[in-house]
Amino acid sequence: MLDVFHTLAEVAVAITGFSSLIVIFRGSATTWTRQDYVGFSFVLCWSIGSIFLSLLPVVLVEFEISLASAARFGLFSLVTYMSAVALLLTAVQRRIAREGGGSVPLRPRLLMGVSFLTIVLIALGAGSGLLPGAAHAWLATTIVLLMAHATADLGVFVVQTIRRNRAG
């Protein structure tokens, strides 16, 4: 089972690298706004978090913690991590918007919010034992969902850039 978490970490590294390539190519085409930096911070935080959350059970098992306990700890760590990132970066986005730095359109914010809540609720339910099945399977599932969330956030980031370039 630990091989699954190694594989998830490798996929998360690939998403992080792909995100960086997009930024490299995008950087030469446009200037970055403060909202762009925050948007890309979300992408990096979600993908880098996926790496560490994927490796967490591997490390904990090495310390002779059972896989089930390590997975439950990972599920609650995922909730804590995602909540901290979302609170911090959303506060920064709002501050920038108040200062006249533009805001993220409502539709992408709502979609990303629903995605965020889905992942957090699944992780809380599985970590609390409310969902059937093994905790490690739910941890792997939530990490995959977090990577999908990072990829969707990257898509929002790229689409917003294209729209801004066409408008301005």
Image: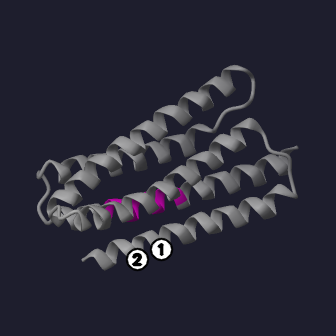
Q: What's the residue type where badge 2 is placed? A: Thr
Three-letter residue code for mark 1: Glu
Q: Main secondary structure of the magenta part?
A: helix
Q: Is residue 18 left or right of residue 25?
A: left
Can you say which quadrant of the picture contains the N terminus?
Answer: bottom left
Task: Tell me the element at label 2.
Answer: helix
Say if residue 122 shows up in the picture: no
Total numbered circles = 2
CA distance for labels 1 and 2:
5 Å
From the viewer's perspective, tell me whether residue 128 is left or right of residue 119. left
- Magenta range is 141-150
- The answer to whether residue 130 is above or below residue 102 is below
Name the colouring of the figure: one colour
Which one is in front, 124 or 66?
66
| Quadrant holding the C terminus | top right
Observer-nearest of 161 and 139: 139
| Residue 72 position within the rendered picture, expressed as x and y whole percent measured from the top left | 20, 54
Query: Residue 88 versus residue 161: which sits nearer the camera?
Result: 88
The residue at which mark 2 appears reads as 7
Label 1 element class = helix
Q: Are marks 1 and 2 in contact (CB under 8 Å)?
A: yes
Residue 42 in the image: x percent, y percent?
56, 47
- Residue ID at (32%, 48%): 77
Instruction: Tell me the residue at 41%/46% (across/down).
Output: 116
Question: Does residue 116 show up?
Answer: yes
x and y percentages locating residue 15 in the rendered image: 56, 67
Q: Mark number for residue 10? A: 1
Q: In this rendering, would 107 be left or right of 76?
A: right
123 w.r.t. 94: above or below: below
